[in-house]
């Protein structure tokens, strides 16, 4: 009988310890004052001036630029059709037909400059580009 | 649309004329594309002739160093919550980046805190050594890991790696950092058993990768849903770091293949898409191992992914287990023969490719019935890692070139 009581007592002590452990481990955190650092950092870009658009496309040159993304050429082909139908004397240049090497998403400033140079060679009044997926 | 606007701001233009054609345009029929374009055309015409540029400035007048400090009162959990709310987070709890902890992290490098490592697109955030230390603290890294983190960020920002595209595409890319040289053992980078798996507390593999991703995403300002447009994302974006098991490599190490000096401590960064395990217990010859590898690499690269390209093509990474490397070496094969075999045997059927590509012919090699999936043997990079066992791994990378940089102590 005494042996059984002893066993029950040990069980109770073990249970009490087990139940109190989470309270010991996950007790209330202490509030404190911190000096923290903002991880975002600042932005540095060179400001770029963007030209005004022409007030009409009649008699103007429009360059269409496709970067190779899925069906962007099909979108621009339709834009070309509708411009030709609806705008008098508009001149349309599909850049990818003259310069197939521009069919790319530029991966560097050098490539971007090369594409811009090829676009500029047509002296466009407006450039329409597609970004599709 | 937000991605397009972010991109414009990142090149210095506060705004540009945009017309939104409802997504998707890829993978739909031509008549649907034409109908969507027709519906958008009045707006295209309007934006072409009536849009006026915004003259606001997009640049910050603040200096990048020192980083902004601020006082905060609360518990450690409150700090994590604050950083969650500010989107200064990868969703996991952080170590609060206090000034003292940042100072301690900076003791791990001889570089000056004000040194600028680069500008991170698409946000064009300026990453200084000090700011990198802030992220290293948040990730739980130790000061001795810090030089690896700095080298990895420098490598990712190399123009050949094209981080802007990698971080904004719908394709789920994740940076992989491979470490070579004495530093692997010096700081305890895992390269043997379970090298890619979770490590012990503050493991370099876990915390270096986490720090790199925090830097690129928070300073670079690229988190889903925009401007990071990754369709599903990838769990590899939390961390993907391992060392090469150089003692088990019978050939040139990865960094040597990339042009680094023998014995140099380096990082090589990749952008990884697919992860394929080769469970090959039966083969006991070089060809027995490399044949199923080549036959798997081909459709993964050329049909599942868009690795079949006309230009230089992607670099593909094969991580051989020590036992597989040993079997191949004992058959008398050198590294050049391994690469040539993979190149010659990893081919796709042009008929399959044409179905995948909706009948649109590739710009070159369209007349080949079974073209090799990448341009040449040099497109394959081979390294050795892992412990005992018969499992090797193929990592399908993207057109963003792998870049190797020496680690500056």
Image: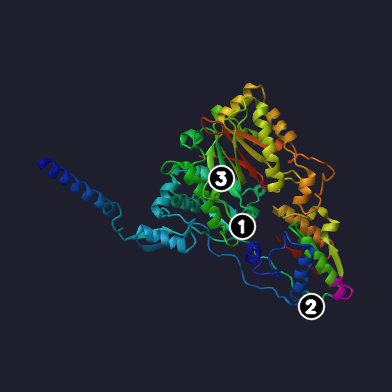
The residues bearing labels 3 and 2 have C-alpha atoms spaced at a distance of 49 Å
| Disc on res. B152 | 3
Quarter of the image where the N terminus of chain B is located: bottom right
Relative image position of residue B52 (x, y in whole percent)? 71, 75
Q: Of circles 1 and 2, which is in front?
A: 1
Q: Secondary structure at mark 2?
A: loop
Q: Secondary structure at mark 1?
A: loop
Within the image, what quadrant is residue A6 found in? top left
In-front residue for pair B243/B363? B363
- Indicate the colouring scheme: rainbow
Within the image, what quadrant is residue B22 found in? bottom right
Relative image position of residue A92 (x, y in whole percent)? 85, 67
Left or right: A4 in relation to B247: left
Q: Could you tell me if residue B24 is visible in this image?
A: yes
The residues bearing labels 3 and 1 have C-alpha atoms spaced at a distance of 25 Å
* Residue B120 within the segment the image draws in magenta: no
Q: Are marks 1 and 2 in contact (CB under 8 Å)?
A: no
For image coordinates 39% across by 52% down, the residue present is: B100
In-front residue for pair B160/B359? B359
Q: Which residues are magenta?
A: A83-90
Q: Are marks 3 and 2 in contact (CB under 8 Å)?
A: no
Q: Chain of mark 1?
A: B
Q: Are marks 3 and 1 in contact (CB under 8 Å)?
A: no
Q: Chain of mark 2?
A: A
Which residue carries the number 2 mark?
A55
Q: Of circles 3 and 1, which is in front?
A: 1
Name the N-terminal-most of marks 3 and 1. 3
Which residue carries the number 1 mark?
B231
Relative image position of residue B90 (x, y in whole percent)? 49, 55
Q: Chain of mark 3?
A: B
Both on one chain, marks 1 and 2?
no
């Amino acid at each position: 009988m005494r042996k059984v009581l002893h066993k029950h007592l040990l069980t109770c002590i073990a249970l009490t310890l087990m139940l109190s452990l989470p309270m010991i481990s996950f007790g209330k955190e202490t509030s404190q004052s911190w000096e923290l650092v903002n991880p975002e950092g600042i932005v540095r870009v060179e400001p770029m001036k963007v030209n005004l658009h022409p007030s009409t496309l009649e008699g103007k040159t429009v360059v269409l630029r496709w970067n190779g993304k899925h069906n962007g050429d099909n979108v621009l082909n339709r834009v070309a059709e509708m411009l030709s139908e609806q705008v008098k004397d508009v001149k349309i240049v599909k850049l990818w037909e003259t310069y197939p090497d521009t069919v790319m998403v530029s991966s560097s400033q050098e490539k971007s400059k090369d594409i811009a140079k090829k676009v500029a060679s047509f002296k466009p009044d407006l450039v329409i580009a597609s970004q599709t997926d | 649309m937000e991605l397009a606007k972010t991109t414009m701001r990142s090149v210095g233009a506060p705004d540009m004329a945009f017309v939104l054609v409802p997504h998707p345009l890829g993978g739909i029929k031509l008549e649907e594309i034409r109908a969507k374009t027709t519906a958008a055309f009045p707006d295209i015409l309007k934006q072409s002739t009536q849009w006026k540029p915004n003259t606001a400035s997009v640049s910050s007048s603040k200096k990048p160093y020192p980083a902004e400090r601020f006082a905060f009162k609360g518990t450690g959990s409150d700090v994590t919550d604050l950083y969650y709310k500010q989107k200064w987070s990868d969703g996991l709890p952080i170590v609060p980046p206090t000034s003292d902890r940042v100072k301690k992290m900076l003791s791990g490098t001889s570089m000056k805190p004000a040194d600028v490592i680069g500008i991170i697109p698409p946000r064009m955030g300026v990453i200084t050594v000090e700011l990198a230390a802030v992220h290293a603290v948040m990730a739980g890294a130790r000061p001795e890991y810090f030089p690896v983190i700095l080298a990895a960020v420098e490598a990712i920002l190399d123009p050949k790696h094209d981080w802007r595209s990698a971080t904004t595409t719908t394709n789920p890319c994740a940076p992989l950092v491979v470490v070579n040289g004495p530093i692997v053992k010096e700081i305890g980078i895992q390269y043997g058993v379970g090298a890619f798996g979770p490590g012990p507390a503050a493991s370099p593999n876990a915390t270096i990768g986490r720090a790199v991703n925090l830097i690129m995403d928070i300073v670079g300002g690229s988190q889903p849903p925009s401007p990071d447009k990754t369709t599903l994302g990838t769990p590899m974006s939390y961390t993907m770091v391992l060392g090469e098991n150089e003692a088990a490599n019978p050939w040139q190490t990865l960094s040597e293949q990339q042009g680094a000096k023998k014995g140099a401590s380096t990082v090589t960064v990749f952008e990884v898409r697919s992860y394929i395990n080769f469970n090959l217990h039966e083969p006991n010859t070089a060809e027995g191992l490399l044949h199923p590898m080549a036959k798997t690499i081909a459709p993964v690269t050329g049909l599942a992914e868009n690795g079949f390209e006309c230009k230089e093509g992607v670099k593909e990474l094969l991580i051989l287990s020590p036992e597989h490397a040993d079997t191949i070496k004992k058959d008398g094969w050198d590294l050049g023969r391994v690469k040539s075999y993979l190149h010659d045997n990893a081919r796709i059927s042009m008929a399959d490719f044409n179905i995948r590509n909706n009948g649109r012919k590739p710009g070159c090699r369209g007349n080949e019935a079974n073209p090799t999936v990448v341009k040449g043997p040099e497109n394959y990079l081979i390294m050795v890692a892992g412990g005992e066992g018969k499992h090797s791994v193929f990592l399908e990378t993207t057109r963003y070139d792998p870049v190797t940089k020496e680690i500056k102590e």
